[in-house]
Amino acid sequence: EEYHKINSTTADLKWKIEVNEATIGKLSALIEKLNGEVLETSGQIEDVKAQIVEMKDQRKAENDAFLEAKKDDEDAIVLLNQAKDAISAYYAEHNIDLGKIQLVQQEPEFKKSQDQAP
């Protein structure tokens, strides 16, 4: 009977070893798969970081261009106002009558509907 008990224990241990080896094989394959996914995800994260840097650079360049254009527009407004003042002064000094179009310096007023909010 003791011999039978030993054989039974041995068989049980062999079966457990086989099951554990199979489990180890499955888990090893899962680990390899997950490590591959980690590497792929890390690569994607690096790509996104590079895209963010590129977008920030592009945004800065576009903002700089906008600010330069805005400054140019503001300078042009100042220059046009100076030119208008110089021409008006010239006309005034030489008693040149300004035509109807030159006198209009404000936007036209449009009729307002009674239903329009103030």
Image (spheres, rainbow, N blue to C red):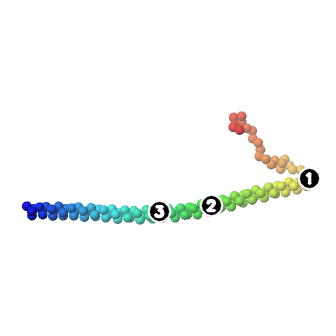
Sooner in the amino-acid sequence: mark 3 or mark 2 = 3
Element type where label 1 sits in the image: loop
Q: Amino acid at mark 2?
A: Glu
Q: Where's the C terminus, which quadrant? A: top right
Residue wearing tag 1: 95
Quote the CA–CA distance across marks 3 and 1.
74 Å
Residue wearing tag 2: 62
Q: Is residue 84 found left or right of 49 in the rendered image?
A: right
Labelled disc at residue 75: none
Sooner in the amino-acid sequence: mark 3 or mark 1 = 3
**x and y percentages locating residue 37 in the rendered image:** 39, 62
Quote the CA–CA distance across marks 3 and 2.
25 Å
Quote the CA–CA distance across marks 1 and 2.
49 Å
**x and y percentages locating residue 71 in the rendered image:** 71, 59
Q: Amino acid at mark 1?
A: Asn
Nearer the camera: disc 1 or disc 2 = 2
- What residue is at 33 percent from the left and 62 percent from the top? 30
**x and y percentages locating residue 25 in the rendered image:** 28, 64
